[in-house]
Amino acid sequence: MRILHVIQRYLPAIGGAELYMEALSKRLAADGHDVTVLTTDALDFELFWKPTARRILEPASTIDGVRVLRFPVRHLPLPALSYSALRRLLWTLARMSATPSSWLHWLARFTPWTPALSRWLATTDEEFDLVAGMTITFEPLIAAAQQFAYRNRKPFVIYPLTHLGAGPKPGQDAVSQFYTMRHQVELVVNSSYLFAINRDEASYYQRCGLPADRIAVVGPGIDLTQLQGGDGARLRQRYGLSGPIVGMLSTMAYDKGATHLVEAVRTLWQRGVNVHLILAGTILEQFRRYWDRLPAPDRNRVVLLGTIDHQTKLDLLDAIDILALPSRTDSFGIVFLEAWTYTKPVIGAQAWGIRTVVDHGQDGLLTPFGDVQALAEAIQTLIENPQLRCQMGEAGRRKVLHQYTWDHNYPLIRDVYRALVYQGNLTR
């Protein structure tokens, strides 16, 4: 098969979607298929609205047998303001039924603005058997890829990775409404096939009109061999840590629950609870401002690592006693799988999608997003119950082995690709 994958970033840029696409693409390539990934030149996520963020300079490369083509992100004047203003305008117009979808797509093409990528799709004479796009909040890339597929009478597969939020119904809280705008939902419903990352996402789009026989729930997987070799003792010694450790591996942002986690641990310190906190991941400006306002004694007690390499990540997974990701903007949370692989219990937010990944009380705990006291109670419960931590961690590892390895999930995706390409019975 000749496969074209389209995504907002690709290795060496790291994120949940990026890891998902990389694992899938390299396995398809290893199976002998020709795989091309179209993406932007963003290394830092913030490049989409911040011109000074880091880029990947090489426009074309081959990574693990996958051809990667990168196209530059461009910016309107005053990009930090214009990017957010356009997204809010899109949200407002999408709620007005009289607004044509074509207007929404025209506005969305600037968020992010990648004219060279769109031009390549509009003019290339390369032929592909199947096109797939990932991450619905980058809908201009999805729309360009879908148009290319249908113009060439090829199936289009979508992995929306929709953040359905923590509201009373999926897609109804303030943040998730930016992932479920009318033109975004139409892109999903008009696709040949949907790979939903969790049951909540599948149910949401089925209610929006996508037939059940064009939907499969296939979460990401992990490669157990790539997660071996963590040395927690080495990391503890490096930072002089003894006693229980809570770790977070994610982008440091409010919607990810990073500020709430720090405040929960500060609450426990005030109670006299002995606990360390390690934060690892890209630090966004909003979190940096919060961090700079913290009292110096509290800042000095938290290990803020920023972006880390793979070995440090493994050491961190081995060192921690609890993994916390109390986020309302994750559609799955691959880091939960990675923590469970190391038999560590997890704490997540009571959010749509996440509730189908973490079984509350069995392999982790779920707390209301933004509820610092509830988060502190969950951490303290696990700290004070080593046997419960062990039971939850073991339950999580069993779940990973039974449901979430790539040996299990990759064939499910590959077989749908084959059916779309060779049997033609799943086309739009």
Image (cartoon, rainbow, N blue to C red):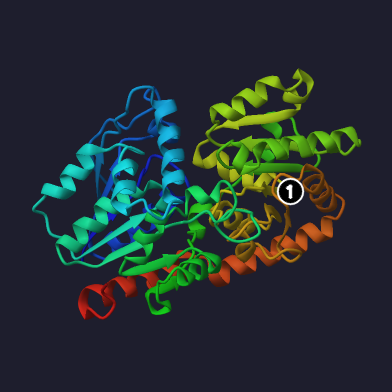
Residue furthest to the left: 125
- Residue 305, quarter of the rendered image: top right
Residue receiving disc 1: 321
Q: Is residue 192 above or below residue 423?
A: above
Query: Is residue 64 something that shows in the picture?
Result: no
| Horizontal arrangement in the rendering, residue 330 relative to residue 21 (left or right) | right
Q: Residue at 54% x, 69% y: name it.
A: 199
Q: Is residue 253 left or right of residue 1?
A: right
- Taking the view exactly as shown, the residue that stands out farthest to the right is 272
- What amino acid type should be assigned to the residue bearing mark 1? Asp
How far from the left and from the top, in percent, is residue 419? 28, 77
Q: Secondary structure at mark 1?
A: loop
Report whether 416 appears left or right of 362.
left
Say which quadrant the C terminus sits in: bottom left
Number of marks in picture: 1
In depth, the one of 404 and 126 nearer the eye is: 126
Q: Is residue 399 above or below residue 283?
A: below
Q: Nearer the viewer, residue 113 or 7?
A: 113
Front residue of 425/320: it is 425
User: Where residue 19 sits: x, y (%)?
Assistant: 43, 51
Q: How far from the left and from the top, in percent, is residue 348?
A: 67, 53
For this rendering, which residue is in front, 177 or 162?
A: 177
